Image (cartoon, coloured by chain):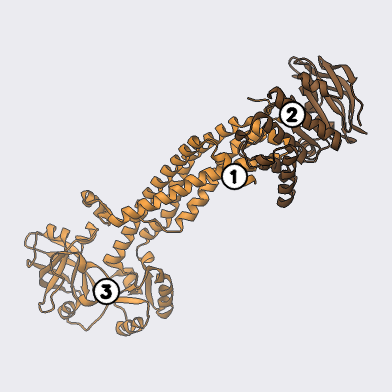
Chain colours: A brown, B orange
Amino acid sequence: MKLIELTDVSRIYDETIVPVKAVDNVSLQIDTGEFTAIVGPSGSGKTTLLNLIGGLDQPTSGKILVDGTDISTYKEDELINFRLHHIGFVFQAYNLIPVFTAKENVEFIMLLQNISKEEREKKAISFLEAVGLKERINNFPTELSGGQQQRVAVARALASTPSFVLADEPTANLDSVSAESLLDLMEDLNEKHNMTFIFSTHDEKVIKRAHRIIQLRDGRIEKDIVTKKNN
Amino acid sequence: MLFILAWRNVWRNKKRSLIIIAAITAGLSCGLLASAVMYGMYESLINSTIDRELGHIQIHSIEFDEEKILNDTIPDFKSVLNEIKKIPEISGLSSRVIIEGMCSSASSSRGVKINGIVPEDEIKVTTIQKQIIEGSYFSSNLSAEVVIGKKLAENLDVKIRSKIVLSFQDFEGNIVYAAFRVAGIYRTESSLYDQSVIFVKQSELFSLLNSKDFSHEISLRLNSFQQVDSVYSKLSKKFPTLSVKDWKLLAPEIKVYYEILDIQLYFFMGIILFALLFGITNTMLMSVIERIREIGILIALGMKRSKIFLMIIIETIALSLVGGIAGLIVGVIIIEIVNSTGINLSAFTEGLSQFSISTVLYPVLPLSFYPIITIMIIFSAIIAAIYPAIKAIRLKPATAIRTY
């Protein structure tokens, strides 16, 4: 089922000074349940493409449809609301709120969605259990390892019940054991719950596990390889 | 949860928060003490004027109010006195005869206001008896006694038991001369008063004037300051043909001081808070700049910019209120301590007596001052937070989350 559709999308920075085409006329489609890696060398446009899909940036031209809705024409407030209800983010540097415990970090996204306190608490605990952090729910980020923090970030991403999860270099700051463990978790969520994951990555471990690899160069799609069919 | 987030953010950098909290505490408590000293000074001025001379309310004939001549007496003053005595709020009343005259000693003469009083009644209204510094406040068995101020005694070069001659016009315009002995010398907070007002028994004036009892002025003291307005309106209605005035009408200049004092003090505190505002803004700006990535993440996750704005405002209010409440508590403690001992300004007696201000000051602030100051702190915090909050909401999430 079609989840994301990009048509002739370009993103040009510093248009009036020295124009830089970070994404150049990209068209692609991502279906529900995909486990896709966007790869490429530094400056190839991975992060910009991820930002465009995630509504963190707007295209200079082209159209981005998510669940059939064109988000390329959205205003800032509409984009914030769209991100809150449709997208789960996992960032490279975990980026948890340092003054919140693991549970509060997961709860916070549901608070923004106006979910009741009881439901928030119940869901937060169950998501943290799902990522294997049942014993760590009341720990602050500084009391958790990098791998554990990234698991909390995954739980937070899932807590908003998003249409898909965008993960920007999620294993970049992790040791290989934690990285494999995190990928196991994500793969498991993808297989069992048909959750769509889109990664931007350099990491071979992620690329090896991806079901589809979109390779970028100079803002254009160089290769688009499906390595494993979706269930 | 937003409040919890804001509160915990305040304490992320404890040292920085404590420094600005200490600055607010110090600024506010010193400001409060300075305000309390000023308030105490004005209260001293008001109290000393009321205690020394005015009482809370005075009654005169309307003509006396305008010309202050001997003939302008209160008509049927005894029945007026009887009516007033029925009012329960009144703790003392003194009927006075007031004559402008001359006071002469062997070496000098001065114009004076001669207050003919019933000494036992006067002590229930004013504090002259307590301010006697030499001699005594009339003795019942001696006649022709006068109580004068220290400054007048110096000007006339007289001492206790010295003889002075009082001269004034009688009802027909003839000059009456009479010799009196100085029984007591008083000193009040006002040197002007001390050199121009003398007290004699009114019975002596009646006999010198060869007249029946009469009164120019009835001065009242009430059980409490708060009763002035209600008793004043009661008396005004009861005696429409007389001039009834409360202390504010009798001393309008003090009333004006009293009215503008609050504005002055709020303005003064406003200046202190305005200065602190820049420190608070700086602290919050540092806090926002340190958290650019985190704020970017919050926006990326879906936190509305209005909520980010609110979060920064709450953080600033929390920070300012902690300092503000600490400042209020420290300020109240200092004011209470200084109030219990008083501030001795006897080194400045000469200058202070020109303004009728006591040489021992008791700093005090009305309770109504504190909630208004708290509101001013919150208001200042909101102003201080605006720039950092705008800075926070203008962040672009895609850029902010990559800021290290």
Given residues B148 and B358, the one toward you in this image is B358
B359 is higher (above) or lower (below) than B59: above
> Mark 1 = which residue?
B314
Q: Position of residue A187 (x, y in %)?
A: 81, 30
User: Which of disc 1 and disc 3 is earlier in sequence?
Assistant: 3
Q: Is residue A56 visible?
A: yes
> Mark 2 = which residue?
A181
Q: Do labels 2 and 1 share a chain?
A: no
- Looking at the figure, which quarter contains the C terminus of chain B? top right
| Image side of residue A99 versus residue A228, left or right | left
Amino acid type indicated by mark 1? Ile
Amino acid type indicated by mark 3? Lys
> Mark 3 = which residue?
B124
| Image side of residue B164 versus residue A133, left or right | left
A216 is higher (above) or lower (below) than A108: above
Q: In which quarter of the view is residue B231 placed?
A: bottom left
Amino acid type indicated by mark 2? Ser
